[in-house]
Image (spheres, rainbow, N blue to C red):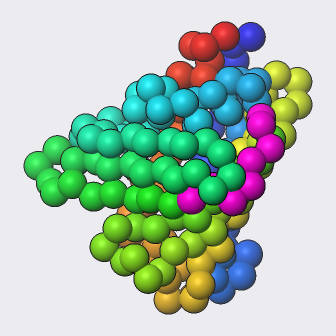
Amino acid sequence: MTHATSGSAKVTLPADDQILIEREFAAPAALVWRAVTEPELVRRWWHAGRGEMTACEIDLRVGGAWRYAMRPEGGDEFAFYGEFLEIVPHERIVQTETFEPFPDDPSTNTMTLVERDGATVMRTLVQHTTAQARDMHIESGMEAGMQDAFDRLEQLAISLS
């Protein structure tokens, strides 16, 4: 089933140490799940069209590790990594996330997928350890790249049907 692009992600701040990201994708949950959990698919959208993804490692099991690295055009490589804490296929992933330059400040991210009428709402609650860490995340400019990455993710998920 193919739909038009569902729009942009909504970012809210439910608590002083949290970020909530919500986005509807015009694709079933099973296809969105594949696009966010299969390394060969993640490599096609995560970079947001802003450079080269240099690493995409996903050991999708509780206790398994993940690591994504990217080299933006004209910039230095940066990476994120973490561990999977909970996995409910096609519905939920809870994982830690650490931005490599700040190894002492991981967040815990809870992503849920809810499908309705062939479209899927993804909600990701990012729980930081401090308000300062949350503010640094927001001020990093992550939102523009995330919007572009999500547009690519949606087109990829649609193409899998």
Q: Residue furthest front?
A: 63
Q: Percent from the top left, x then y, of residue 32?
A: 66, 30
Q: Residue at x 71, y 82 (%)?
A: 15
Q: Percent from the top left, x then y, of residue 97?
A: 52, 64
Q: Percent from the top left, x then y, of residue 122?
A: 72, 45
Q: Quadrant of residue 90?
A: top right
Q: Percent from the top left, x then y, of residue 43?
A: 40, 32
Numbered-mark total: 0
Residue 84, visible in the rendered structure: yes
Q: Is residue 156 left or right of residue 74?
A: right
Q: Quadrant of residue 158?
A: top right
Q: Main secondary structure of the magenta part?
A: strand
Q: Residue furthest left?
A: 74
Residue 123, visible in the rendered structure: no
Q: Is residue 131 left or right of residue 3?
A: left
* Quarter of the image with the C terminus in it: top right
The residue segment tinted magenta is 83-90
Q: Residue at x 58, y 51 (%)?
A: 64
Q: Residue at x 32, y 49 (%)?
A: 69
Q: Residue at x 39, y 49 (%)?
A: 68
Q: Is residue 51 left or right of residue 157?
A: left
Query: Is residue 104 positioned above or below 69 on the image?
Result: below
* Quarter of the image with the N terminus in it: top right
Residue 104 falls within the magenta-colored stretch = no
Q: Residue furthest right?
A: 116
Residue 88 falls within the magenta-colored stretch = yes
